[in-house]
Structure formats: structure tokens, C-alpha cells
Amino acid sequence: MRAAAVIGCVVLFVAAVAAQRGDSPGQRSLPPVSFTCVHHPDVVESRPGSCPFCKMALVPVRLDSAWTCPIHNAVVESSPGTCPVCRRPLNRVTVSVGWTCRNDAAVERLEPGTCSDGTPMVMRRTLRPHGNHNPQHGGQFFMASDNWHHLEGTYPRERVFRMYIYDDYARPLSADRLKKIRGRVVTKETFDPRTRTTTERAAFTLRLVRNAEYLEARLDQVTFPLDVTAKVTFDDRTDEHRFDFTFTQTTKDSAPSANVVQPRESRRTNVPTAPPADVEPARAIPVNKDEPDLAVDTAVLADPSTQTIPTSMQGMVDLLRSRSTEVAALIERGEFSAVWVPAFQAKEVALALQPHLSHLSPAQREIAAPALRDFVRAAWLLDAYADVGNRLQIEAAYQVFAAAGKDLASAFAER
């Protein structure tokens, strides 16, 4: 789940793979042009600008979807289906689309055209970092806050927690890198808000399994739903990362997890720095009341076709409450990968209320204007924290989200 944006993690394919597919630019309309950072590919904007991290100018790119096998990375299709090698369902991933020449692979264009030898250009799909957040072994997939490591937690059989570690292209780490990883699995812990410390009451060491590509921990007797917290350091120089998993049943390696939401085609442009894991939830998200009003993000992240926004203020308020309830239910069940959908849909409803601020009384406007700003910011934070799978941060973001939503409903509700 930072920064999925927002797009998820995949392998890089050579031009020949896509060229042999025979895709024709006339088969369908071209994907729209977006703008991304060369060094931070998770930054995707709908218009030119500079990278919020390195300040370099954003470059144009066309982003599209493709389908690839979770195990056999050379398999790339333009539509859903099954892998011809292992028959697993193909996963949707995000790719950049360009056109090149068969006799000169260095040629890269955003539009189809003709090569110097008179032959038509061929389409090339390039898989991107953070383009695939699909689990490869039927588990739950998270992104570390270092923006590079990714991991998948599974519960393949009773009392066994298994963790797979990947890079930013969803490629399994080498054995040498895996040997540097240290971690433990916690099934019982308590948080003291007075001292802001966490006490672990049941912790189990993650160990590298011989001749395998994963780490395992053997747990005590457990029951479903099973809440598991993995605390991991990727080498001796990095801080510990926290990932919270919820399992309602054992995971199956033969198919993707039922809880997985397909990756978005655009990602957020600025991922907040994750606060420490041992943080009091109510204080996890600072709110700056002096920030200007937030404008609508023109890169639509929640599919507008899945939601019709009512025209009346009361209808929008009712839909806002419904989406907030959906977010709360997903968090309660630990389905973090799905949180972004109702959160961003709620954000769009809130932004649809923005033009109606002028219809409110001065007293109502004093409540609604800062609540709108806080609500939109909290929706982004819910997306960011859901990607890294830290329940404390997610719940803290939801507290701000819910409080701001309540203020919006109070200010805009018809009397």
C-alpha cells in the first residue's frame, strides 16, 4: 500500500516481449499522458511540474494496465486470463506504454509513428517500480516505508506465519539479502498511552527456512480472526518496520487473495513520513490549520463510474457517512488493501461539497472549511498507511477522517 499511489511493484520487461505480442496502436484509444519523476516513479501527476522529493522536472509518460503471472514474470498479456505455464490467474499491473522501432530499440516515443526505414513503430510495455502490489502466494501484500522493500505475509497452515520479501519490482530478494533480514512476529501486545511504549507479551522469531525463499515463525495456538504484527529490519543500518496482518482463514498459494484490490493507474504524489510504530493513535496525525484549501486532484484515483454523487447537499452528506462506515468496517476486518476505494470515494464527495461552502452561514462555514481540508488530507493518509500495513497509523488517520466527516455532516446537513 508508500507511495501502491499508489502504483504497485513489478519486473522490467525487455522490448522484445511486448513487440512479439503484436499489439496495434489502432486497436484501442491511447492511454492519457501523465507526468512522473525519473527517480521517484511512484510520483504521478496529471500535469507538468516538479517532483516533490528531488525537485526534478516531471517527464511525460503513458500509463496503462497489463496482466502478468505472479510466478512467471515473462508472461505479459493485454487482458485478464490464466498463465500458460502454471495456470494461475494473471494479476493486473501498471505499465508505461511507448513506441519503438524493431531495428533500433533505443527509439522511444509517446505516440505511434513511422521508423526511419519506413516500417511502423511497435508498441512497447515497460513494467514500472510500484506497478504491482498483487500477492504472489495468496497472502497480504504491503510496501515498506523505505519505498523499496515489499513483503507478503501468509498463514499457510496452523501456527505457521510465512513472509516473502521482494524489491520494488516485486522480484524476490536474493538469498544474500534475505540473510540480512531480522524480525519477529507478535501476536499479543499492549500499548501504554502514558509512557507511549508497547509491551510484547507473545513474540516469535522469524527464521530463514533452509533452501527456501521466505522466512517463517512458529506461533502458539491461535484462533481466527488472527491478528499478527511483523516487526522487521532489512539490515543492520535501518530502522524497524511494522506490518499488521489479519487472517480469517489459512491462505492458499494457488490463487490470489480474495481481499486484494487491483492497483490504481495513478498514485499519490506525496507520501507522508511514517511516524514511529509506538505512537499514541489519537496524536499520530498533526493538523495544520494554516494550510490553504485543497483543490480537487484532477488525476481521478477512485473510478467515477463506481459512484454517482447526489446533487443535493443532504444526499452528499448521507453518502459521505456511508463511505466512512465502509472505511471503518474494512479497517476493523484488517482488509487494508481495500481501504483506499471508499476513502477516495468519500474524498470526492467531500470535494463536491466545496462549492456549497458559500451557501452556509458564517458559523457553519467556520466548521466546514477546516473540516473539508482535514478530511481530504486524512483520506490520503489512509491510502498511504494502508499501503504499509501499520494498523496504529491507519486507525489514527481514521480518527481524523471520522471527526472531520462528522463536522462536515453537521455543517451541511439540512435542518
Image (cartoon, rainbow, N blue to C red):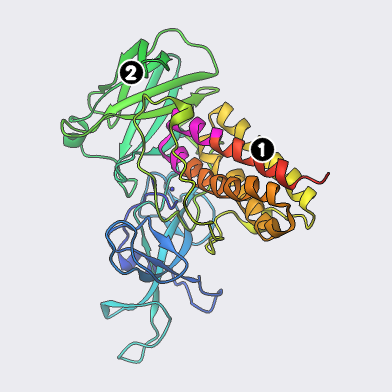
Q: Quadrant of residue 149?
A: top left
Query: Residue placed farthest to the front in the image?
Result: 362
Task: Give the Cα separation between the discs numbered 2 and 1.
Answer: 42 Å
Check disc 2 and report its element: helix, strand or loop. strand
Instruction: Tell me the amino acid under the disc marked 2.
Output: Ala
Q: Could you say which is closer to the camera, residue 390 or residue 68?
A: 390
Above or below 127: residue 187 = above
Instruction: Tell me the amino acid under the disc marked 1.
Output: Lys
Q: Which residues are magenta?
A: 384-399
Q: Residue at x 39, y 48 (%)?
A: 271
Specify the label residue 217 is tagged with.
2
Specify the label residue 269 is tagged with.
none
Assess whether residue 89 is covered by the magenta stretch.
Answer: no
Q: Residues within 10 Å of mark 2 (few under 14, many from 20)?
A: many
Q: Is residue 257 visible?
A: no
Check disc 1 and report its element: helix, strand or loop. helix
Assess whether residue 391 is covered by the magenta stretch.
Answer: yes
Above or below 326: residue 51 = below
Specify the label residue 406 is tagged with.
1
Query: Residue placed farthest to the right in the image?
Result: 415
